[in-house]
Amino acid sequence: GDAVIFYWKLSPDDPDQSDNARGELVLKACHCCMDLLNNLGTYDIDIPDCATKVLRIHLGIGAGTVYDVHVGGFPGRWEHFIAGDAVNQLSHVLDLAKAGELAMSHQALRWICCILVVDSCDIGDYDKRCVILEGLERARRKSTVPLPPPRANEEVDLWDVVPTHWNVELYKSFMNHSAIYKLQADINQSRIFRFDSGLNELLGISELRQVTTVFIRIGSLRRWDNPALLNDAQHAMSVVQNSLQRYEGSLRQFHVDEKGAVILCFFGLPPLAHENDASFGIKAGLDVCGQFTDYFDDFAIGITTGVVSIGGVGTSVRTEYAVMGDSINMASRLMCHPEAEESILCDERSFNLCGDEFFFETLGEAQVKGKARPIAIFRPTGVRKEGARPTAPKSALVGRKAEQDVLSGELQRHCADPAARLVVVEADGGQGLTTLVTYSQMEARAKNCFAW
């Protein structure tokens, strides 16, 4: 599964900082969550060869202090994340909510009870850990709590009053170009994320490719009431960014919950794709591990390699670059394994691709969540042959069905009519040109055509 976090907050300069004002925010969150459950709580899907036919969501609400934190800088990428008591509560209550349920923390319940008569709310299970909210249809406001005055322009959004295909062009006239220049450091470096590319190009991307995933957890970065932790977070981000720059990886996310900070990186995403991305991922992991050892006493790294789906997810209102696949989940599982404490664990696929380049400890098999059978795990401990560049194994091309059909069709026509033909294969760097050309050469040789 995956998760989405959204939040409402009172600005520090807001004149009303009372518990009633906080309760109004919790009430908005509750109404939003109940609406999500009513509309998306059960979502039917029909995917060929997929045993899952229904997707279900579960939701959690936390309430408390939230910190907006920005870390990064050199060599040019910034990450924004939220942390604090409200985020820490979320992780606890969300684990307790079953599919189709909304769980809320006791702090959230205390604030919503400042404005609602608690007996009028449909509350299911109630224990020391969380509260299950089943509905607000019968909820009544306390007679002493009036409705809050509407905020200026709160209910009006430019996205709501124009057709969606006009949105980007309409917003361009309101853009502060100085701000845009600075914000580009918060955006993935690929060409498709330029402001002038438009969202349709991102939404049109959908492909499968082999990617190496690196999950990094720093357990000591939990509580953010101590300013010293900001320096620790910045140091962690700097170490990871420098390693990613050295080995041409992509930073996907810096996320914080009650278990600490989690940094997600990929090797093999466009435009930074190579034949030996698994090797680069392990080298970056070893680099980060070596520097973290002298600075943090609670960290872990998990590395896996596998085929993932990449592309744009969303609508013209908001679109995000998503990377989805089983190997990503497995990297997270390895990161949480006890053997990964202050070291690295990798999967069998990464080991097979890089076994001649690194020294490994074979740790046997481990049972992980999401797998019916135990999986083999390995610990890379050092580089065996520095500078070696392995030859990529010849394997079946994943995805690119349309391109394969075009190339196969041209080869068949060439076999039937030996007249010279020209096919131009063109794309940005990192989009898989080398792999596609190798596929063409293999197909040509299989059909007894001359290839070089």
Image: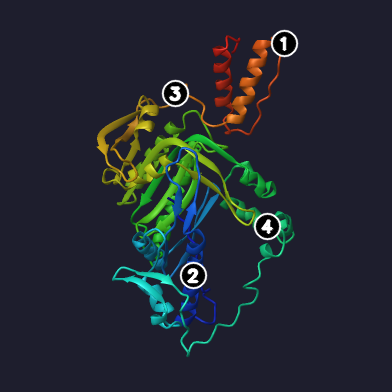
Residue that numbered label 3 is attached to: 390
Residue farthest toward the left in the current orientation of the protein: 364
Total of numbered circles in the picture?
Answer: 4
Which element carries disc 3, helix, strand or loop?
loop
Kindly report the distance in space between the C-alpha atoms of the residues bearing marks 2 and 1.
67 Å
Judge by depth and name the residue closer to the eye, 19 or 408: 408
Judge by depth and name the residue closer to the eye, 82 or 228: 82
Kindly report the distance in space between the C-alpha atoms of the residues bearing marks 3 and 2.
52 Å
Which three-letter amino acid code belongs to the residue tagged 4? Answer: Ser
Horizontal side, residue 98 vs residue 203: left or right: left
Instruction: Please tell me which residue is depicted at 26% across the width and 32% down the height of the picture.
Output: 362
Mark in the foreground, 4 or 1:
1
Residue 214 seen in the current view:
yes
Which three-letter amino acid code belongs to the residue tagged 3? Answer: Pro
Judge by depth and name the residue closer to the eye, 101 or 201: 101
Judge by depth and name the residue closer to the eye, 300 or 319: 319
Kindly report the distance in space between the C-alpha atoms of the residues bearing marks 3 and 4.
44 Å
Mark in the foreground, 3 or 4:
3
Residue 120: x and y in percent read 42, 81
Which element carries disc 1, helix, strand or loop?
loop
Residue that numbered label 2 is attached to: 29
| Nearer-N-terminus badge (2/4) | 2
The answer to the question of whether label 2 and label 1 lie on touching residues, with beta carbons closer than 8 A, is no
Kindly report the distance in space between the C-alpha atoms of the residues bearing marks 3 and 1.
37 Å
| Nearer-N-terminus badge (2/1) | 2
Which element carries disc 2, helix, strand or loop?
helix
